Image: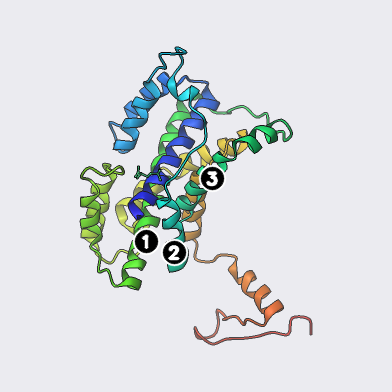
Amino acid sequence: MVHNGIEYGDMQLIAEAYDLIKNATGLSAPQMSGIFGEWNNAELSSYLIEITRDCLAKMDSETGKPLVDVIVDKAEQKGTGKWTSQDALDVGVPIPTINSAVEGRLLSAFKDERVAASKIIPGPSARCKVSKKKLITAVRDALYAAKICSYAQGMSLLRLASKEYGFNLNFGELARIWKGGCIIRARLLDQIKKAFQRNPDLPNLLVDPEFCQAVTVRQANWRLAVKTAVEMGIPYLAHSASLAYFDSYRRDRLPQNLTQAQRDYFGAHTYERLDKPPGQKFHTEWTA
Ligand code: 3PG
């Protein structure tokens, strides 16, 4: 099930990369097939990038157009992505990239409403501000960094589910198994296997030295791709969710101190203080 959740994340990230390149550069599907073909020779090498290359190259014999251009933009689903999201909520593990992939499919299914809304709600008229070459490199780096975050979330879910349900999972072995015949088979899984061999108790892939380095060197391009998508009004659901996950996970202080203050204000739910031992609870009469 979690394999399929990760698969949903990968597919949404790839769809977003395709959408941004298409709209920012005007390249045709067969031209983009060449880009995905190149990406498949390096760190993004995977079954899903390989079939994306082939899907984009396929021409429709009836219209003479690229086949993807005549396919209706409504994604269906059999439910395994949704189950992953439901289970993550039950276990209490954040998997925003996978959740956004499920929601990306749901949003796509509202085709009639979207077509009507497109005639009512204007978007920005901004054009891409960077060169085609720079944009394509940024999209590639963003895709890889966001993908690492997505796998980090899936592995984190498995780690905590393994504890909760007593599965006693071996994560390096799982990564190895997923290399054989699975839809998410990818070069990245070798790195994941090595990361868990280095540290079987790794709390999150993002703190493994190699993954930390891989994301850090792509950080500027990742932000550039998300920024370009936001400026152009192109939905970058899974990339933004991955980036926000990354920015949340690497922050030592998040704004939930304010959330705790609000909870204590309206519900006397209490809070802990930074300057007092953990577990000691405090309540304030906020209007006194
Ligand atoms: C499959 O079983 O075909 C896929 O793993 C997931 O299918 P879905 O995209 O229809 O949920």
Out of 48 and 41, give the one closest to the viewer.
48
Where does label 3 land, which residue? 106
Tag 2 and tag 1, C-beta contact below 8 Å: yes
**Percent coordinates x, y for residue 20 in the rendering:** 51, 32
Residue 116 is left or right of residue 86, and the answer is right
**Percent coordinates x, y for residue 86 in the rendering:** 46, 60
Image quadrant in which the C terminus is located: bottom right
Q: CA distance from mark 1 to mark 3?
A: 24 Å
Q: Secondary structure at mark 1?
A: helix
For disc 2, the neighbor class at 10 Å (few under 14, some 14 to 19, many from 20) is some
Note whether ligand 1 is within 8 Å of mark 2.
no
Residue at (43%, 68%) from the top-left corner? 91
Residue 173 is left or right of residue 140, and the answer is left
Is 238 situated above or below 258?
above
Residue at (52%, 21%) from the top-left corner? 26
Q: Amino acid at mark 3?
A: Leu
Mark closer to the observer (1, 3): 3
Q: Secondary structure at mark 3?
A: helix
Where does label 2 land, which residue? 93
Q: Is residue 217 visible?
A: no
**Percent coordinates x, y for residue 119 in the rendering:** 71, 30
Where does label 1 land, which residue? 156
